[in-house]
Structure formats: structure tokens, C-alpha cells
Image (cartoon, rainbow, N blue to C red):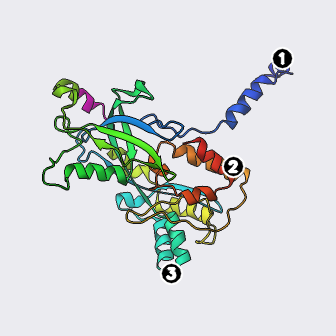
């Protein structure tokens, strides 16, 4: 821009104002490949989905992904855990040291920071009353142990008079009725169930092949390039914890172990700062598509009530 152009723009604040607004826009972490059920004001939701077989030449119809999410004095640590692919994780090493210290307080900290398991599958949205435009489309769906248990139960039923069903099978699988409700403060999937066996698209192989070819790769989600190096994670962990491996904030994300109830600490919460709230906003945006963070598997009611009010409001606006 020349001097004469600058003079012509003198007094026009709109251009600079627009640029400043764009700089202040919150980053969106929404990935349009992922689907999740929309909940009403009572946190109830309903949809019918069909789990799809493994895409292409991939072996499994689901991917397993471990992640960490907690806040220390230096900010949030939100990362994929390299143990997903057999790598070393500096946070898991710190957690192991804390757990083996013999102090119950150290075990509480380790529980706050432990890795969390999610599953990711391709699905066909059969019915989505809240968003009918999603029907007939293929998405990725991230879910936790409760839904995975229902999948396993359908494949290995408990009683002899029940027929094993592979939910991922095009021809002999079954639609899944996803029924979501809030129970004791947690999002609950207990009433979700599989329908009777049925062939998708009435067994039309042409349509089924087209559907199969439209699936997303699952191996790419857990490819090595989706995980930071040990050194990068170590550097980030040092930024978050500082020189104290016990450094933590009360608004750390807690999760249940696969065989235990949620654990929380009762240390007083630090007063929120503008930077803290910005980090929290980015955190909740990034995890908004992950339903398990809103269930007893991911969130603790006690933990939520301990949050500073401003951060708790951010959370509530995203559920």
C-alpha cells in the first residue's frame, strides 16, 4: 500500500476493525467427519445408526485411541497418548512414579492425569430426528467403553438362547438405537440397544459397495504422524507442570478407570484468569464432539461443581 492509499483510508476504521475481530475469533476444533447425537434441554437424545465394516483393506472396524487431558499450573495438557501405538509417553511415566510412591495423594494426581480410552468407527446415520440432513450419510463416531461393551455383548451374548450378531456386518448386522439421557448428572447410554438382524439396503450389493468405498480410514487416525514425539510431549509436560510433577489444578479432567468410579481431588481451585478461561474454551471446543467426556466415563459431577463459575459456564454451554 502506497502513501496516497494510506491517506485515502484515513478515518476508515472498518477494515482494521474487521481484521481485529477475525484475530479475536475463537478457534473451532469441529471436525465435520465426526457425528454425535444432538441433545435437548433435558440432555435426552435419540438416533439410529449402523456400525460399518472395516474400510478398504484395514483389518478392524474400529480404532482404539488413548488420550490425556488435564490442566496444570502452566496450562492444559491435551494430547494423544503414544502408548496407543506402543510408544513411550512421558506423562504415563510420571503417573507411574506417582502411583508407586505409596502416597494416596500421589495416586489421586495420577488418576486425574491417566490416559483415557476411546473407540472410533465408521457409521451410517439411519435416523437423526434432530438433524435429518445427516440421514443416509457416513460419519466417524467416537464412543467409549459403555457402547463398546454393548457391541461385544451382541457378538458374545450372555445367554444360550441369544444369537451372536456382528454389528459391523452389512448383511447380518443390526441397527443401533442410540438412546441418550441424563442420570444422576451424567449422560447415560444404558437404554441403547441393537435392533433385530437385518441386511442394510435390503442387501443391495451395488449400494453397499458404494457405501463401503465412502468410509473414512481408521488407521490414519492412529498413524504415527498423529502423535507427537517423546521429546515434544516432554517439553509440553514441563511447560504445564513446571518443576513440580505434583503441580495440578482442581479443574483437571478426571476419568474413570475401566473398573473403578471417578476419582477427584478436593484442593481449592485457583481463581480463573483470562488466559485460563481461553485455554478452557479451546479445550471444551476441541472435545465437544466426544460424548464420553460428558458421561460418568469422562466427567465427574464433583469435579464439575468444583470448577470456577466462569469455566463451568463454558462447559455447560457446550453440552
Circle 3: element type: loop
Alpha carbons under labels 1 and 3: distance apart: 69 Å
Q: Quadrant of residue 261?
A: bottom left
Marks counted in the figure total 3
Q: Which residue, given by chain and number where applicable, does mark 3 sit on?
A: 101
Disc nearer the start of the sequence (2/1):
1
Category of crowding for the residue at label 1, using alpha-carbon neighbours closer than 10 angstroms: few (below 14), some (14–19), many (at least 20): few
Q: Which residue, given by chain and number where applicable, does mark 2 sit on?
A: 310
Between residue 10 and residue 314, name the one nearer to us: 314
Q: Quadrant of the N terminus?
A: top right
Disc nearer the start of the sequence (2/3):
3
Alpha carbons under labels 2 and 1: distance apart: 44 Å
Mark 1 vs mark 3: give the one in front.
3
Quick check: is 214 in the magenta stretch? yes
Between residue 35 and residue 182, name the one nearer to us: 182
Mark 2 vs mark 3: give the one in front.
2
Image side of residue 11 versus residue 57, left or right: right
- Residue 161, image x, y percentages: 13, 50
* Residue occupying image coordinates x 24% and y 40%: 53
Can residue 133 be spotted in the picture?
Answer: yes
Magenta residues (range): 210-215
* Residue occupying image coordinates x 30% and y 47%: 62
- Residue 285, image x, y percentages: 56, 43
Mark 2 vs mark 1: give the one in front.
2
- Residue 218, image x, y percentages: 33, 44
Disc nearer the start of the sequence (1/3):
1
Amino acid at each position: 500500500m502506497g502513501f496516497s492509499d494510506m491517506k485515502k483510508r484515513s478515518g476508515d476504521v472498518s477494515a482494521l476493525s474487521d481484521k481485529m475481530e477475525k484475530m479475536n475469533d475463537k478457534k473451532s476444533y469441529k471436525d465435520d467427519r465426526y457425528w454425535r447425537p444432538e441433545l435437548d434441554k433435558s440432555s435426552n437424545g435419540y438416533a439410529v445408526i449402523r456400525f460399518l465394516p472395516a474400510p478398504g483393506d484395514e483389518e478392524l472396524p474400529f480404532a482404539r485411541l488413548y488420550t490425556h487431558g488435564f490442566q496444570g499450573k502452566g496450562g492444559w495438557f491435551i494430547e494423544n497418548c503414544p502408548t496407543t501405538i506402543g510408544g513411550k509417553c512421558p506423562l504415563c511415566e510420571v503417573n507411574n512414579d506417582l502411583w508407586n510412591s505409596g502416597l494416596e495423594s500421589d495416586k489421586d494426581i495420577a488418576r486425574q492425569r491417566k490416559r483415557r480410552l476411546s473407540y472410533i468407527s465408521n457409521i451410517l446415520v439411519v435416523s437423526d430426528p434432530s438433524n435429518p440432513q445427516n440421514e443416509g450419510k457416513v460419519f466417524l463416531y467416537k464412543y467409549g467403553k459403555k457402547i463398546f461393551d454393548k457391541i461385544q455383548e451382541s457378538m458374545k451374548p450372555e445367554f444360550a438362547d441369544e444369537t451372536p450378531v456382528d454389528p459391523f456386518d452389512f448383511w447380518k448386522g443390526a441397527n443401533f438405537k442410540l438412546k441418550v439421557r441424563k442420570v444422576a448428572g451424567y449422560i447415560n447410554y444404558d437404554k441403547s440397544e441393537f435392533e433385530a438382524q437385518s441386511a442394510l439396503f435390503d442387501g443391495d450389493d451395488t449400494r453397499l459397495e458404494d457405501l463401503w468405498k465412502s468410509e473414512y480410514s481408521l488407521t490414519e487416525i492412529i498413524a504415527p504422524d498423529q502423535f507427537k514425539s517423546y521429546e515434544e510431549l516432554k517439553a509440553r509436560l514441563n511447560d504445564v507442570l513446571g518443576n513440580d510433577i505434583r503441580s495440578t489444578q482442581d479443574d483437571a479432567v478426571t476419568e474413570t478407570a475401566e473398573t473403578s468410579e471417578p476419582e477427584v481431588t478436593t484442593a481449592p481451585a485457583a481463581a480463573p484468569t483470562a488466559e485460563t478461561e481461553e485455554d478452557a474454551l479451546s479445550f471444551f471446543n476441541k472435545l465437544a464432539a466426544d460424548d464420553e467426556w460428558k458421561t460418568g466415563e469422562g466427567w465427574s459431577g464433583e469435579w464439575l461443581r468444583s470448577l470456577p463459575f466462569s469455566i463451568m459456564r463454558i462447559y455447560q454451554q457446550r453440552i
